[in-house]
Amino acid sequence: MQHKNGNSRSRRSWAEPYKIKMVEPIKLTTREQREKAIAAAGYNTFLLRSDDVYIDLLTDSGTNAMSDNQWAGMLLGDESYAGSRNFDHLQDAITKYYGYKHTIPTHQGRGAEHILSMLTIRDGDSIPGNMYFTTTRMHQELAGGHFVDVIIDEAHTPSSQHPFKGNIDLDKLQSVIDEVGVVHIPYLCMHATVNMAGGQPISMANMRAASKLCHDQNIPVYLDATRAVENAYFIKTREEGFENTSIADILKEMCSYSDGCTMSGKKDCLVNIGGFLALNDDELADRARNECVIYEGLHTYGGMAGRDMEAMARGIEESVSYDHLHARIGQVVYLGEQLLAAGVPIVEPIGGHGVFVDARRFLPHLTQEQFPAQALAAALYVDSGVRGMERGAVSAGRDPDTGENRKSRLELVRLTLPRRVYTQAHMDVTAESVIDLFEKRDRIRGLAFSYEPDHLRFFRARFNPIGGKQILDDSPFSTQSKSLSDTAKI
Ligand SMILES: *Cc1c(COP(=O)(O)O)cnc(C)c1O
């Protein structure tokens, strides 16, 4: 069977296109230590101390390993307050690979989202987009707007095999425009890839069509380019006509369908901190620089040290290498395929930056109010010291108008792979633990809030297990066994 990413299922023909020059020891813990640690963290993996974590798959954000060339660049940091030469290098790299005219550096992606939202959104506006992202939507709402999801329906169905589940539903998009009127749509927010859908890509054809639809009606398009390079890899390997196009050329064409982008450099750009807002419009860029000076720092550093900008400029260059992406996404596929082979329900096709376990199907004995994904992430940590994160009802938060919990259709545990950090052996350990838990899934308890923050609650919320002391019991609890056996075959 031809594999979606170009590998055959049984072949392990690639190895990491780098060798290891420095190591960071990680700690092995006992189950007892982990039970204590997760209880102290309120069953929220965000609140664990990283010293207590064995394999950290919490996020791919800022967790990348830099190359020797990037570290060398760190020593060439020009730490002048104004006009650092590293800013020029960064701006040149962005113009060369992303194609935008102006770069406004920011401390990270949300800094760029803040500036763009403040400048473009007016009270009562609607911002259509291919699925929300937590910080993106937060800034849109703080600016007085509200986000409207126009992603295709397949994105909400974890088992759908659609190769471009990040696509925009053009009919949904046009309906939103018709409903609220062009003047109340500040821009289309186009994500590539779509983080909350499981790192699913958007196709070039869809970007082109959505962009045309908007531009024909004078609606700007802004790209969330956080993982656009990974998206480019999917276009190259899945979309007809791009087999022989370079990643760099694909990326350039993708960006050409937008008027600018917000960027979290902590992902694709292979660095640990930083971001940028890139724009083509001179006047808007000028206003963005004014906001940057207020909220981020001078417009030639925006919260980043000179050395950070140099590392990012070099990281951008490395990020568009096909060999890098083939190994990076290949590692995600390697983990995902082990889980699939064992019957563990995951989001398919396997996405770009992580494997998303479908906690709803994994833990059918829990209702969504018992936060199955949060519970599964906590249980996984207890089982093996692997840290993942919840992407479900807790992350979705409450509706700001009604105060009700948002009903997220997806209830996922994200196992996110830092770039160039772990080996295939780490993936084997992770897969074994998830598969083991799947066999004893009827021992995992649900969770109830003991503390709920007002904003972005998933970061700092605390929980208690429902009906028992441990999140993961030594034996199945008797009341659950019936409903489990009904749904045991998934
Ligand atoms: C991480 C992320 C952001 C926010 O960037 P930060 O650097 O964390 O502030 C925005 N959009 C997407 C899709 C992301 O993954």
Image (cartoon, rainbow, N blue to C red):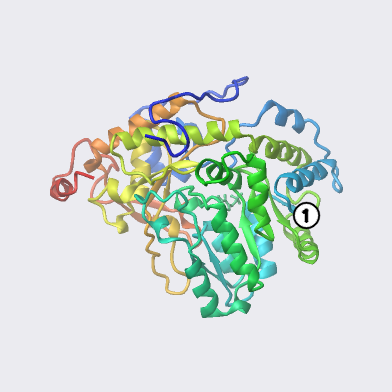
Which residue position is annotated with label 1?
101
Estimate the x, y position of residue 167 in percent, counting from the top left.
50, 57
Q: Quadrant of the C terminus?
A: top left
Taking the view exactly as shown, the residue that stands out farthest to the front is 241
Is residue 460 visible to us here?
no
* Crowd class of label 1 (few under 14; some 14 to 19; many from 20; radius 10 Å): some
Query: Could you tell me which residue is drawn at 40 percent across and 32 percent down?
Result: 385
Labels in figure, total: 1
Estimate the x, y position of residue 28 in percent, counting from the top left.
43, 25
Determine whether the beta carbon of the residue marked 1 sits less than 8 angstroms from the nearest atom of ligand 1. Answer: no
Query: Could you tell me which residue is drawn at 36 percent across and 49 percent down?
Result: 373
Quick check: 178 above or below 422? below
Q: Nearer the viewer, residue 294 or 349?
A: 349
Quick check: 431 above or below 137? above
The amino acid type found where label 1 is placed reads: Lys
Q: Quadrant of residue 277?
A: bottom right
Query: Could you tell me which residue is drawn at 34 percent across and 47 percent down?
Result: 358
Q: Secondary structure at mark 1?
A: loop
Q: Nearer the viewer, residue 453 or 210?
A: 210
Q: Nearer the viewer, residue 176 or 35?
A: 176
Quick check: 417 above or below 102? above
Is residue 314 visible to us here?
yes
Left/right of residue 168 with respect to residue 184 in the rendered view: left
Left/right of residue 445 with respect to residue 347 in the rendered view: left
Quick check: 399 above or below 13? below
Estimate the x, y position of residue 263 in percent, counting from the top left.
65, 51
Left/right of residue 469 with respect to residue 19 in the rendered view: left
Estimate the x, y position of residue 404 in percent, counting from the top left.
39, 69
Q: Quadrant of the N terminus?
A: top left
Left/right of residue 97 with respect to residue 30 in the rendered view: right
